[in-house]
Amino acid sequence: MSKQYTPAKVWTMDSENGGEWASINRPDSGARYERTLPVGKHPIQLHSLATPNGQKVTIMLEELIAQGVSGADYDAYLINIGDSDQFSSGFVEINPNSKIPALIDNSGNSAINVFESGSILLYLADKFGHFLPTEIAARTETMNWLFWLQGSAPYLGGGFGHFYAYAPEKFEYPIDRFTMEAKRQLDVLDKQLAKNEYIAGEDYTIADMAIWPWYGNLVLGKLYNAAEFLDVESYTHVQRWAKLVGERAAVKRGKVVNCTWGEEWQQLAERHSAKDIDAVLKKQP
């Protein structure tokens, strides 16, 4: 068991608490410095990073482009959270919560700022009329799973991922607690996918685009190096779905956008045209 911790009467921030993100985490919000955001040639401007939350949106945009939706072409600029780019005045103006991704749509009479990855997926689906059913029952089922992801992913990322992979010290209680929850969530998905081709039924929707970057990457061994620890091979239906979605061309394209780690063919800091992605993917051995 971990050593006993007695909370203070009034919490104050310990600047020496360590951890990978200790240098940027603070209990206040707002801009920390002045910097305007770059502006590209397309109406849709994305400012993001290829974390699971960022991948949701680039996958959606690439799926729309694959459907022939010309208005979905976009510029994607890198927000390096390790360098505190998310605290610039320009980014905070789009998203006061200082989290990626954030999107600006300049296609109308006035700019529309959209933040929170689930909100962006819903906005794009409604705007372009793809990947979200219009029939009430099917739409509601898709929304059920979109909101399930938005509520569940913090337990996987901020809970399991943080204490298992990133915390400066390993403590038994939080790792056990969040591992149990991560496995429960995988079991929820496995039982749902035992009955359906995709998350919300027989059609590929924004629910799949939201869930795959987290749980698909996890069971494919591409998140937290935790596949063996979580026994992901036992979730056979999630494995089947993860591989199915992962083979989609738009998913492969969306994953590389705003990515600055991994192999050379996996990295594209900025995206301004389809040719940018083509050039990167051609490097794959």
Image: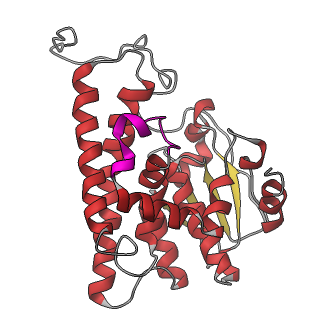
- Whether residue 83 sits left or right of residue 230 in the image: it is right
- Residue positioned 38% across, 28% down in the render: 164
- Residue positioned 68% across, 84% down in the render: 68
- Whether residue 142 sits left or right of residue 246 in the image: it is left
- State the image coordinates of residue 273 (x, y, percent, origin top left): 79, 66
- Whether residue 267 sits left or right of residue 106 in the image: it is right
Q: Quadrant of residue 236?
A: bottom left
Residue 84 part of the magenta segment: no
The colour scheme applied to this rendered structure is: secondary structure
Q: Quadrant of residue 178?
A: top left
- Residue positioned 27% across, 51% down in the render: 185
Question: In the image, which residues are magenta?
Answer: 221-234
- State the image coordinates of residue 202 (x, y, percent, origin top left): 39, 81
- Quarter of the image with the N terminus in it: top left
Q: Is residue 168 visible?
A: yes
- State the image coordinates of residue 89 (x, y, percent, origin top left): 59, 43
Q: Is residue 26 visible?
A: no
